[in-house]
Amino acid sequence: MTVDFEEWFHGLTSTGKQPEIWDSLEDRIDIGADFLLSLFEETNIKATFFIVGVLAEKRPDIVRRIVEAGHEIGLHGHVHRHVFTYKPDEFSTDLSANLLAIKSACDASIQGFRAPAFSVRNNMNWFWEKIAESGLAYSSSLFPIRTPVYGAPDAPLIPHMRGNVAEIPMSVFRIAGQNVPFSGGFYFRALPYNVVMHMTRAMNKRGEAVIFYFHPWEFDPNHPQPSGISRREKITHYTGLKHSREKLRRLCHQFQFSSLNEYMPVTK
């Protein structure tokens, strides 16, 4: 169970590219955070929270609350910028700022990183080199699908090593030779729950764990919809918000989950 811990305006492609306006937008992180932490406590789930650095700077109290609840903390970029837009040294600077923000908020062992919007491609070897240089042990950034915004369709489907770093890719379900996403975000919200349940059980029966991912804003159905966002954003960001809490609650009661460092123990 993983959470990409970000504000609603970090997750929108349009507002996410405009950090200069973030302070003027409504902060709503508590709504989704309260729901997730309460549900995880109720179902005895320990998750991995990949946290945006500027959010940790603004709300260190929530970071400490996550740690005190026994969840793993990881990094999600300091300003939620797509990794493939960085030069290697620029990414190192962002990674250092993200790590400093988390360390300033809490005393936790940080081992993992997830690229904002899964913005890593299979041939970006410098990315894993920079992750290793930072002292981290794993990444969970590859998504083996093709979309207009992100994806690495040629990536391996199972956890594997990239030099000294473990890469834990997002789960996909193979149908007729195609990789079908289902285990989080828009895909989880848009698909009928029984389809998600069937795919999860089928993979579990083959001995495969399923990596789920969610965002706090997905459980805040009334968060704002700015004017001027694209049609694609209206679909991918706002579809299924009305029933997302009910679906996640069912999932958490039907399946067992762990944090990534418990699923694939890694130490650095």
Image (cartoon, rainbow, N blue to C red):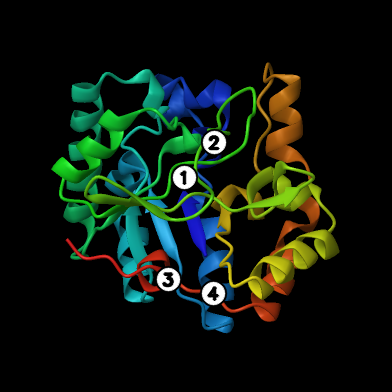
Q: Nearer the viewer, mark 3 or mark 2?
A: 3
Q: Position of residue 142 (x, y in %)?
A: 47, 41
Q: Residues within 10 Å of mark 1 (few under 14, many from 20)?
A: many
Q: In the rendered image of this protein, does residue 116 appear above or below residue 70?
A: above
In this view of the protein, which residue sits in the foreground, 98 or 8? 98
N-term-proximal mark, 3 vs 2: 2
Note whether residue 222 is visible.
Answer: no
Identify the element where label 3 is drawn: helix
Residue tagged by mark 4?
257
Observer-nearest of 49 and 19: 49
Label disc, if present, on residue 11 of the rendered structure: 2
Residue sticking out furthest to the front: 177
| SS at circle 4 | loop
The residue to which callout 1 is attached is 6
Image depth: mark 4 or mark 2 in front? 4
Q: Amino acid at mark 1?
A: Glu
Instruction: Determine if residue 67 is in view.
Output: yes
Q: Are marks 3 and 4 in contact (CB under 8 Å)?
A: no
Q: Earlier in the sequence, mark 2 or mark 1?
A: 1
Quadrant location of the C terminus in the rendered image: bottom left
Q: CA distance from mark 3 to mark 4?
A: 9 Å
Q: Determine crowd level at label 4: few under 14, some 14-19, many 20+ residues with C-alpha closer than 10 A.
A: many
